[in-house]
Image (tube, rainbow, N blue to C red):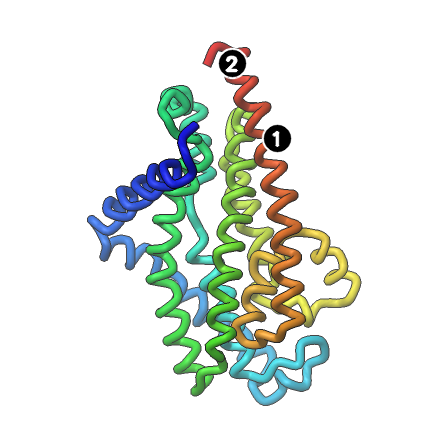
Amino acid sequence: MGTFPAEFRKYWAVFRIELRQQTTYFWDFVLGNAVIVLFFLVLIQVWQATVTPGNVAALPGEHLNWPELIWFLAAAQTLYFAVHTEAQIEIEHDVISGNIAVVLARPYDYLMLRFATSMAHTVLSLAVALPAAVAIAWIVSGTVAVTPLGAVAFMLAFVMRTALFLALQAMAGLATFWVEKATAFVWILNLLIITFGGGAVPIGFWPSWARTLVELTPFPTMMYYPAMLLVRPEPALIGATLLRAAIWTVILGGGTAIIYSRALRRLDVNGG
């Protein structure tokens, strides 16, 4: 095994190559990711129709005013659409096609290779989703309900959310070693994140019993808490978010390592 700088340079090179390939058809990429604009506008219309802007602050639970709610939703949609890679499908394809055996023969860690390529997609998606969400939130709210500290805290949480999501995708993709197709997990995972992550309806507005249940999952750490950091970067919230992210990183990272190890043993047994 090489030194850490040498290992890092390998995956950095993979990241740059993938980034260059993605930007070859940059405008196609932009248009393909512009769906955040439509989704965000529809979500705002739903909130305006169900709860008028003047009554938002009176709702129990979050005590967000209208501008804060809009910027929270902007952050949540950025988290959802920017971190929306196809790593799970790519892993599934590698397993089914047998390409994973070829990749494993190269001087790369397979999961780190997938992480590097997925990060290239995520960085470009962020470059599209974030400006679009910021522009809409600014126009709709009429103000910028964000502080520099909130922006920094959000970006830090964005990185942690990306790592958690890729861990979940890796586990779902590696399930192909035991099930014929794992594609259905893509839709299930995305649905769980957008629903139980509190990205459309902040979980502070949920009934207490429902919030207690979803707090036992990693999804609020992947959407709700990072989005709240953008509008309310309080020290207590920053600490709680970092702690939750660290706990779930250990749990999901450990789960991924266990599944990956067993998948490799299964590959060896079957003559992969």
Mark 2 — residue? 268
Callout 1 secondary element: helix
State left or right for residue 244 relative to residue 101.
right
Instruction: Bin the neighbour count of mark 2 within 10 Å (Cα to Cα): few under 14, some 14-19, many 20 and up.
Output: few
| Nearest to the observer: residue 244 or residue 136 | 244
Kindly identify the amino acid type of the residue bearing the numbered disc 1. Ile
Tell me how many marks there are: 2
Is residue 98 among what the camera can see? Answer: no
Q: Nearer the viewer, residue 2 or 91?
A: 2
Residue ID at (53%, 31%): 174
Residue type for callout 2? Asp
Q: Locate residue 116: give its quadrant.
A: top left
In this picture, residue 253 sits left or right of residue 90 = right
Q: Is residue 47 above or below residue 103?
A: below
Q: Which residue is mark 1?
A: 258
Q: Is residue 155 left or right of residue 13?
A: right
At x 57% / y 45%, what residue is drawn?
Answer: 188
Is 167 rendered above or below residue 148?
above
